[in-house]
């Protein structure tokens, strides 16, 4: 080993869902929105003045911040914008989790949380979800250096009521509680109104899922101005110009068309509910989803077998080879035609296994 290797920071990286390179793929493994962004986004793409690319973007992301604040009914001083919610969350870990006490997040949740904790040297503890994959709020009443809760949770798709989340926030006034609401637009009630009651609450959202902008990378946080200013200070100490100019322009257009946004959500929710029922008809146990994906386990066929057989048919779902969830597949809700093909493929798999 070279001498310099001794000083290299080592961490187990987050592994995202596979991005297949082949054509004619049904891609249901990364929770992307199957529908395009709002029409105004496409129009703005054609009209972007590329001469401005020689200039640095607005480091305060003023215009996009104003649009987000107006849409959600908060003050501009209560909004922080970053390059996808991953950027916002990573910056939040770096900013708020600076204690000798462990931060708390569930054992089954978004698998980037422990990666950031390891990367930044933050002690952490992962209380186990209950057998039904629900949070036990009593696990979050002990001394801690911060709390992170994805709601609805990933990969389980389950939503915890605001009343339970509020109990956790209220009990932990001496630490920051981050509620990651990447999927909240697909079901459930947001805890956002609580930011005016609790100065330790940070709500994180993304444009990647419900607003069909995963390729543009826009995320944001809302909370007390003291939290937002602390985030801005750390961000400016790391990289002042994180949000590029096209993302700012296109993000504004994505928020403007609320009718398109609501119609797209309705289509995804309707497809999700239909597919859940169809999966149950062919022997799947499907958790109640408040997200744009389903978490399912078959009564007879191992999840890995289903995953591999679907992949051989160019249908990609997500499989987690991890304790407690290694017999589940996570299925992003695609278009109706994509989900019809997916269900037909599952029926063929079931028939072939039954014959064997």
Image (cartoon, rainbow, N blue to C red):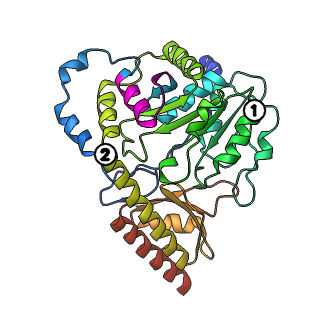
- Which residue sits at x=57%, y=65%? 296
Q: In which image quadrant can residue 303 be found? A: bottom right
Where is residue 328 drawn, in percent x and y? Answer: 60, 62
Where is residue 311 drawn, in percent x and y? Answer: 44, 63
Q: Does 253 sit left or right of 355 as displayed?
A: left
Q: In which image quadrant can residue 301 be found? A: bottom right
Tell me the CA gap for discs 2 and 1: 38 Å
Q: Quadrant of the C terminus?
A: bottom right
- Which residue sits at x=56%, y=35%? 203
Which residue is identified by label 1? 172
Direction right: furthest residue: 142
Q: Does 4 sit left or right of 351 as displayed?
A: right
Dominant secondary-structure state across the stretch colored magenta: helix
Where is residue 134 drawn, in percent x and y? Answer: 70, 55
Give the residues drawn in magenta, as a range: 63-77
Q: Nearer the viewer, mark 2 or mark 1?
A: 1
Q: Is residue 333 above or below residue 97?
A: below
Which residue is identified by label 2? 37
Q: Is residue 111 above or below residue 307?
A: above
Q: Is residue 102 magenta?
A: no
């Amino acid at each position: 080993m070279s001498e310099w290797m001794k000083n290299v920071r080592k961490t187990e990286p987050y592994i995202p869902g596979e991005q297949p390179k082949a054509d004619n793929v049904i891609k249901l493994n990364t929770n992307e929105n199957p529908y395009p962004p709002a029409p105004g986004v496409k129009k703005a793409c054609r009209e972007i003045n590329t001469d401005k690319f020689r200039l640095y973007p607005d480091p305060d992301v003023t215009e996009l911040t104003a649009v987000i604040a107006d849409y959600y009914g908060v003050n501009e001083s209560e909004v922080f914008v970053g390059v996808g919610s991953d950027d916002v969350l990573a910056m939040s870990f770096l900013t708020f989790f600076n204690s000798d006490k462990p931060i708390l997040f569930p054992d089954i949740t978004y698998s980037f949380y422990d990666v950031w904790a390891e990367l930044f040297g933050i002690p952490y503890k992962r209380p186990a979800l209950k057998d039904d994959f629900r949070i036990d709020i009593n696990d979050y009443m002990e001394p801690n250096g911060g709390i992170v809760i994805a709601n609805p949770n990933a990969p389980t798709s389950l939503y915890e009521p605001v009343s339970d989340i509020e109990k956790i926030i209220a009990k932990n006034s001496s630490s920051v509680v981050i509620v990651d609401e990447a999927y909240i637009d697909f079901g459930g009630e947001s805890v956002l109104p609580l930011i005016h009651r609790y100065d330790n609450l940070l709500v994180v959202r993304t444009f990647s899922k419900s607003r069909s902008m995963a390729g543009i990378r826009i995320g944001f946080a809302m909370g007390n101005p003291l939290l937002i200013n602390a985030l801005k200070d750390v961000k400016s100490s790391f990289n002042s110009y994180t949000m590029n100019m096209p993302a700012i322009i296109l993000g504004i257009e994505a928020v403007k068309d609320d009718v398109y946004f609501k119609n797209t959500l309705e289509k995804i929710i309707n497809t999700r509910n239909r597919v859940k029922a169809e999966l149950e008809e062919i022997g799947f146990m499907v958790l109640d989803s408040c997200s744009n994906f389903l978490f399912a386990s078959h009564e007879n066929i191992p999840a890995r077998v289903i995953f591999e057989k679907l992949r051989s048919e160019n249908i990609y779902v997500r499989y987690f080879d991890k304790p407690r969830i290694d017999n589940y597949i996570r299925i992003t809700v695609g278009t109706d035609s994509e989900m019809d093909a997916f269900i037909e493929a599952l029926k063929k798999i079931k028939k072939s296994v039954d014959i064997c």
